[in-house]
Image: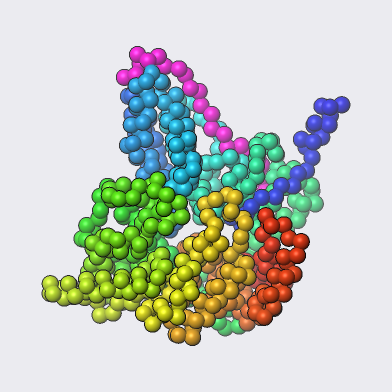
Amino acid sequence: MISNALESWVSAPLLLEGISLNPGIGMGYCVFHQPHFAKPYILPHDSVNEKKRIKDAFEGMRGEIESLLLERRNSFEGETWEVLQTYQLLSQDKGWQLRIIEAIQTGLSAEQAIETTLDGIKEQFSKDPFWQSRLYDLADLSHRLLKQLSPRNSSQSQDADQPMIVISQGMGPAELLDYNRRNLVGLIMEGTGQTSHVAIVARSLGIPVIGGISDVFSKMNPGDPILIDGDAGKIYVRPLDSTVRQFDQRVFEKTHKVLARLDDTPAISKDGVKINLHVNANLAVDLGALKKPFVTGIGLYRTEIPFMIGEKLPTVQMQTEIYQDVLEMADGKPVLFRTLDIGGDKVLPYLPGRKPDDKSSVVGSWRSVRLTLERPTLMRQQLRAFIRASVAKPSVLYLLIPMLAEVSEFIAVKNLIKLEMDRETRLGHQTPAVVKVGAMIEVPSLAYQLASLLPYVDFISVGSNDLFQFFYATDRSSEKSNNRHDVLSPAFLMLLKNIITLCGEENVPISLCGEMASNPLEAMALLAIGLRSFSIAPSALDPIKNMIQTVNVQKISEYLESVSGSPSAKNYFARTVDNANPFETFNNLRHKLKCFAKDNSVII
């Protein structure tokens, strides 16, 4: 009787609701991601041999990762490639290898030393924001080392000839790449971090991802049929036939929408509003997106990568050559170079001063312009490289200053730029004819000094990721706060609208370069509040352009005003706050915008 009831429960349909980390829908069979390896005990007198085994394992693992990344190099760009490079750098960390060797010297086998070291690092750094997204990477690398030590003991078959929904308590980015992309149709995780490395790679692959499913392995069985709805954050385990038929129809509709897009057509809305689409880039190789005719330039070029991957500070000459290559590849299209953004969780090991465990790094308070103004030589050397690179490839030099909190900080940077321009002139060197300097709005305090700031700037770029984080005093890497607030809350949209309006009144160009701009639904809301320039991930160019070409900007503006804008905002809040659970977000504007998109055939 009990066994019959248990069998019925195991095969019954189940609906799970989690947090959407990447939209999309998929149908496949449950595969548990659970690497397991035999760990034989090795006697202490074998420590010399164990050291050789671990050295060989590291060499084999690093070669495997290098081959994996080389094979996938043309598939990834921007933030995703940065994540994979960081992962590769972690595999080459000599400190980690030394800790394992020290554990072997205490009498452990290579396998036991790997596990003991991993457990020690997890215990030591589990609460460190810098390490939170890297612990899964380190676990992945540890599993790869174990696999090198026991190559015949593979963790699982990852090339099954059927569509797979992978279920994981946590994994590193390269582990996801081990799966056959042709068959991988979805990922379900316990974690909820949109900025986790595996979630970033999954977004580049176009794989729907849902997180926040506690005790995930107990909810389903290997081989169970699963429908994953990344748009709604829903998972259908052992679904009914009627549910499967509805999914089939949605897959058909989405496929036809994708086929309908035209890559070379301009980003112009249904009512004739032209939108400027720029791309975000990390490395020169990311500039391939500029080949698309409708891409107007690089709206954010992150310059810290060469500083982070090297063993010492890049020289002025090295930096100059990097920026020259970028300008050469841009071929006349504008490139907005963001000045060095280090500090917080981006610590340069060779730079004396603050350590990763500095309490200020928890909120990233001592980073970017604050750190570089404290070390003006560091900033002046980078400015010198910008100036020289811009002369080699004649163009306007665009500089973007991040993490400003006071107008005085921006003026201080402009003074350093003038000092460097004067220095180059004294040395008889050429200088660019035009230098345009812009400010990033990432700290709320600067948004309220905008009227004082605008006379000094040539353009404004809103960094919505940090601005949202500091606006709501939340932490984007925290699972608890990840779903507590919404960028589509009326309060945050009002802040953005005020910034956009004031820039428009003063004729100062404004763009937005955060994740909001890369999400079609959120970008539609940005159009509604007046934004006309976006800087987005290369992978988001086509989805955002599809949304633009199918939306009537005037219509969505009027709609958004009617449900959340002045003067009805007060009534809107009154309507939604009544009887609200204080531990749940009460904003339903996202739902209303989805309904608008559906009713008006906007592709989101």
560 with respect to 137 (left or right) = right
Residue at point 48%, 73% (across, down)? 447
Quadrant for the C terminus, please: bottom right
Choose between 72 and 320: the one closer to the eye: 320
Q: Position of residue 202 (x, y in %)?
A: 53, 51
Residue at point 72%, 57% (across, down)? 581
Q: Position of residue 134 (x, y in %)?
A: 45, 44
- Tell me if residue 113 comes above or below residue 375 in the rendering: above
255 with respect to 196 (left or right) = right
Q: Is residue 53 visible?
A: no
410 with respect to 75 (left or right) = left
Residue at point 48%, 35% (across, down)? 123
103 with respect to 391 (left or right) = right
Quadrant for the N terminus, please: top right
- Tell me if residue 46 comes above or below residue 493 in the rendering: above
First to last magenta residue range: 24-50
Choose between 204 and 105: the one closer to the eye: 105
Magenta span includes 36: yes
Quarter assignment of residue 47: top left
Choose between 151 and 431: the one closer to the eye: 431
Q: Is residue 317 visible?
A: yes
Q: Which color scheme did the rendering employ for the protein?
A: rainbow
- Tell me if residue 556 comes above or below residue 17 in the rendering: below
Residue at point 84%, 27% (across, down)? 2
Q: Position of residue 380 (x, y in %)?
A: 24, 65
